Amino acid sequence: MTTAALRQPQSDIEILASASAAAAAVLTPPALAFLSDLHRRFDATRRRLLERRRERQARHDAGELPDFRSDTRAIREGSWRVAPIPAALLDRRVEITGPVERKMIINALNSGAKVFMADFEDSTAPSFGNLVDGQLNLRDAVRGDIAYTSAEGRHYAIHGDPAVLMVRPRGWHLDEAHVEVDGEPMAGALFDFGLFAFHNALALQARRRGPYFYLPKLECAEEAALWDAVLAHAEHELGLPHGAMKVTVLIETLPAVFEMDEILHALRERCVGLNCGRWDYIFSCIKTLRAHPDHVLPERGQVTMGVPFLKAYTELLIKTCHRRGAFAMGGMAAQIPIAADPAANAAALDKVRADKLREVRAGHDGTWVAHPALVRVAREVFDDHMSTPNQLHVLREDVTADRDALLATSTGTITRAGFAANIEICLRYTAAWLDGQGCVPINHLMEDAATAEISRAQLWQWLHVAREPRFDDGGVIDFAAFDGELVAARQRLAALPIPGQHQVGAAAILLHKLTHARELADFLTLAAYPSLH
């Protein structure tokens, strides 16, 4: 079946934003009818599941701690496995991620990584222009004719054997306010997934290169089951074999770590692995346990992957995945080259090597990097310590991560420098995001929404929940300290040539509001979305 032959249900879909003339190539009547159908079939379930999130969070705020489910014990204790993994995904030792910008897509596909995850989520600011341009860029990439010429005249095109393409749509919690069906906003997840699948699924399937997806921000098996229903329906409508669409799920929320078996089971015909989305996971730990004073974390720099609760999380993920025949993917190396300081650059690369060595020795099947310059560094570590395409044979039967291990408290301090760094990262990232950039270099790290979320959630928890919070020098952490540092940071950044510099004032107003609010906002991007143009 070709895309032109798809049945077209009655469509009452409205685009509430201006788009370029080129957008008509992806916003076609059949594609919009496909999106309308997805919305009508699945959005009510999505909204019910989001309400369940709110109910679960209310129980945690009242004192209940996350735990393994009693009603799904049979799934955890069963001997089932996921479906066989396609040949194109059997070796994923290094994956590169990034936004759906044209130049980024080309460089990532040419980087030497095994997989490129094109990201509509945390590293893309979801202006309608960015989203539609991203769909056009990926359509051209799938066709193999994507190209880009910079203002300086440098030409970019795909060459050699490009990375396998995977696409990450937005999470279930985000609406696409610029597209309404029957007067209701679409889910960002269904918009991103639906447009990409409609235009590219058949071409990728014909080449045995997909379609493959990363699924973010899941909190429970029922949310995974919703994705499974969406995928099954899309396969049927697009004329793909059942189970042709394959997914990797990011385990980046605290509730999800207690349901990894259940999530794999819900997607067992399509799921090829789980990924340690560690920055979002740290943020989710703060958010989920936001009302628990004994679970307040120290500053971000001290919450390394060696602390007990993160070590337990990664090791349980490896054990769970390999028992089920699925891959266990490692986390992000966010470092970017420091050309002006060779010594600092060497030290940064040493940190990357140490992190990747920890992952491969633990049993991970692959890892993430944020910059093409890190692909070779990560690949060398995995090549030296993983002679097979993956490590499914490493069962990690020694791991016994129970609830107490997953919820272990983390000790440490809060320095004035760490406090100020959280404020600056929030301001710089939010300003760039409001200006349409979702992936921002800050202090030689490629920051996306996850690290900004950690920073602002920590500020809120230190000020609202921590018992008598103090800096390591004995000074009191209070709103006077926050307000003073916010003013100072805003003044410093006003003189710097940074992305979104003209949005720093708006970012400061938003951070002030979110930090002073009595309740921690679920997502920074939700709060900032109405101001995104």
Image (tube, grey):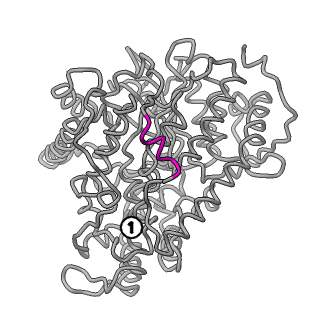
Seen in the picture, residue 160 relative to 46 is either above or below; the reply is above
- The majority secondary structure of the magenta stretch comes to helix
Residue that appears at 23% across and 63% down: 302
In the picture, measured across the screen, residue 37 lies left or right of residue 431, that is right
Q: Which residue sits at x=53%, y=18%?
A: 145
Image: magenta residue range:
71-78
Position of the N terminus by quadrant: top right
Is residue 232 depicted above or below 362 in this figure?
above
Residue 375 placement: quadrant:
top left
- Mark 1 highlights which residue? 493
Look at the image and tell me in which quarter the C terminus lies: bottom right
Residue 77 on the magenta segment: yes
Q: Position of residue 315 (x, y in %)?
A: 28, 45
Inspect the image, locate mark 1, and give the three-letter code of the amino acid beneath it. Leu
Q: Which residue is at 70% across, 23% downward?
A: 236
Q: Classify residue 228 as left or right of residue 374.
A: right
